[in-house]
C-alpha cells in the first residue's frame, strides 16, 4: 500500500505529502482548541473553575509547546522525519483520546502536556520535509499553503470543533457517555488513523545538504540583544502583551456566548470561529500591504508602525465582550482577530529588515516564545481569574475587559518605545 500513489508521478507524490501534512496540521489545531469548545461540559462534569480551565487551555499547552519546539527541531534534523511525525501524531492523539477518561484537573493537565509535546514535532518536521521534496525555486507555493492552513485554523478550528461536538452529541446518549468525552475519543481515533495512513503512504525523502551559513555564537547573539535592548525588549514584551487579550478573547468568547447569551456550545464555537476566520484572513492580507505603503516613505518602519496601529485599533474592541447581543460579541471577535493577524504577518518582515541574517531565525523564535509564553500561557488564566471575582454569568466578559484595558495600552507604549529606538538608531548611523 505504501507505493499506491506512484501512479501520479513524482510531482503528484510531492503534493500528496503536502496534502497529508496540511490535514495533520488542521487536526493539530482542532485538538489544541477543542477544550475551548467543550469547556462548559468539562467544567460542569469535573467541577473545574474558570481559572483551572484557563490553565489547561493556555498555560499547560503553550509553555511546553513553545519551549520544547527548538530542541525537538534540532533532534529532528538528524532523524527520520517521517517516523518523527508519526510518533508525534500518535502521542498527541493518544493524549487527546485519553482526555476522554479524565477524572479531574491533574489528569487533564498531564494529558494537555502530552498534546503539546506531540504537536511540537509536526511543523519543524513538515517544513523540513517540504524543503527536501521540492527544489528551491518551487518551495514557495507548498510552504505558503502549509502556512496558510495555520493562519486559517487559528479560528477555523472552532468551526470544525463545533462540528465534531455536534456529531458527539448525536452518539453520546446511545452509549450513555458525556458528549465532551466522546469528542476526545473521536479526535484521538481520527489522529491515530491519519498517523497510520502517513506511515504507510509517505516515504522519507533524500535530505538536501546545503552549504552552512556562518552563524553567530550564543555570546554574539546576547551581546547583540543587549546593544539593541532599547528596541528588542519593548518589541518582544509588546507582542506578548498585545496578543494576551486577543488570545484570551479567542479562548473565552464561546463560553461568554454560552453563559451570557444562551447559545449551545457547538453553535457558539461555530459563531465565533466564522467571525474570527473571515476577519483574520482579511487582516493577513491587509497588514503587509499597509506596512509596504509606510515603507515607501519611511523605509524599514512599516512593520513596527503596523504593529503600533494594530494595537491602537485593537483597543477599540476591548469592551465588546460585554455586548448585550451575540452579534456585538462577534463584531468584537472579528475586529480583534483582524488586528491580531498583524502579529502573524509583520514581525517576520521587521526581523528581515532590522536583524542580521545570521541571527534572524533565533530572533523569530524568541518572538514566538514571547507570544506563546506571555500571550497564550498567561492570557486565558488571567482573564478567568479576574472574571471569577464578578460571578459566573458576566464574570468572564468583565475579566476580558480588565485584561484588555491593561495589556493593550501597555503594548501601545511598548511599540512607541520601539519607534523611538529605531529613530535614535537611524540618527546614530
Image: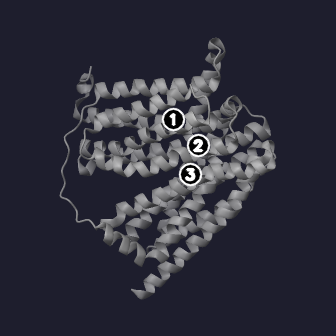
- Name the one closer to the observer, 346 or 265: 265
Q: Residues within 10 Å of mark 2 (few under 14, many from 20)?
A: many
**Residue 277 left/right relative to 117:** right
Q: Which residue is mark 2?
A: 57
**Residue 346 left/right relative to 108:** left
Q: Residues within 10 Å of mark 3 (few under 14, many from 20)?
A: many
Is the residue 61 above or below the residue 350 in the image? above
Q: Which residue is mark 3?
A: 376
Disc number at residue 111?
1
Element marked by disc 2: helix
- Across and down, in percent, residue 379 comes to 62, 53
Question: Closer to us: mark 1 or mark 2?
Answer: 1
Residue at image coords 53%, 59%: 342
Q: Please, which residue is most extreme toward the front here?
A: 106
Label total for image: 3
- Name the one closer to the observer, 292 or 360: 360
- Name the one closer to the observer, 144 or 384: 384
Amino acid at each position: 500500500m505504501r507505493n499506491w500513489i506512484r501512479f501520479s508521478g513524482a510531482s503528484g507524490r510531492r503534493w500528496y505529502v503536502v496534502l497529508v501534512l496540511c490535514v495533520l496540521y488542521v487536526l493539530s489545531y482542532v485538538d489544541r482548541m477543542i477544550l475551548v469548545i467543550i469547556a462548559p461540559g468539562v467544567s460542569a462534569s469535573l467541577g473545574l473553575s474558570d481559572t483551572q480551565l484557563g490553565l489547561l487551555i493556555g498555560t499547560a499547552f503553550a509553555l511546553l509547546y513553545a519551549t520544547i519546539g527548538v530542541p525537538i527541531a534540532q533532534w529532528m534534523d538528524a532523524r527520520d522525519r517521517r517516523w518523527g511525525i508519526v510518533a508525534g501524531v500518535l502521542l498527541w492523539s493518544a493524549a487527546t483520546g485519553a482526555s476522554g477518561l479524565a477524572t479531574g484537573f491533574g489528569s487533564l493537565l498531564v494529558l494537555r502536556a502530552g498534546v503539546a509535546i506531540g504537536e511540537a514535532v509536526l511543523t519543524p518536521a513538515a517544513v523540513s520535509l517540504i524543503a527536501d521534496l521540492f527544489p528551491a525555486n518551487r518551495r514557495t507555493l507548498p510552504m505558503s499553503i502549509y502556512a496558510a492552513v495555520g493562519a486559517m485554523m487559528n479560528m477555523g478550528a472552532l468551526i470544525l470543533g463545533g462540528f465534531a461536538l455536534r456529531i458527539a452529541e448525536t452518539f453520546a446518549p446511545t452509549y450513555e457517555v458525556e458528549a465532551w468525552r466522546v469528542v476526545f475519543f473521536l479526535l484521538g481515533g481520527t489522529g491515530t488513523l491519519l498517523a497510520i495512513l502517513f506511515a504507510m503512504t509517505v516515504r522519507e525523502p533524500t535530505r538536501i545538504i546545503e552549504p552552512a551559513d556562518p552563524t553567530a555564537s550564543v555570546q554574539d547573539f546576547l551581546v547583540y540583544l543587549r546593544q539593541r535592548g532599547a528596541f528588542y525588549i519593548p518589541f518582544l514584551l509588546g507582542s506578548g502583551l498585545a496578543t494576551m487579550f486577543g488570545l484570551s478573547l479567542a479562548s473565552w468568547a464561546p463560553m461568554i456566548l454560552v453563559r451570557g447569551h444562551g447559545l449551545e456550545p457547538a453553535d457558539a464555537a461555530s459563531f465565533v470561529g466564522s467571525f474570527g476566520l473571515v476577519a483574520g484572513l482579511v487582516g493577513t492580507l491587509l497588514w503587509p500591504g499597509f506596512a509596504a505603503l509606510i515603507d515607501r516613505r519611511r523605509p524599514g518602519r512599516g512593520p513596527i508602525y503596523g504593529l503600533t496601529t494594530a494595537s491602537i485599533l485593537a483597543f477599540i474592541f476591548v469592551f465588546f465582550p460585554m455586548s448585550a447581543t451575540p452579534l456585538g460579541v462577534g463584531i468584537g471577535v472579528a475586529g480583534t482577530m483582524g488586528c491580531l493577524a498583524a502579529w502573524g504577518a509583520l514581525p517576520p518582515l521587521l526581523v528581515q529588515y532590522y536583524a542580521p541574517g545570521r541571527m534572524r531565525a533565533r530572533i523569530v523564535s524568541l518572538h514566538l516564545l514571547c507570544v506563546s509564553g506571555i500571550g497564550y500561557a498567561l492570557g486565558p488564566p488571567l482573564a478567568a481569574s479576574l472574571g471569577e471575582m464578578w460571578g459566573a454569568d458576566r464574570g468572564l466578559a468583565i475579566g476580558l475587559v480588565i485584561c484588555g484595558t491593561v495589556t493593550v495600552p501597555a503594548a501601545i507604549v511598548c511599540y512607541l518605545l520601539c519607534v523611538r529606538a529605531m529613530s535614535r538608531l537611524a540618527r546614530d548611523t
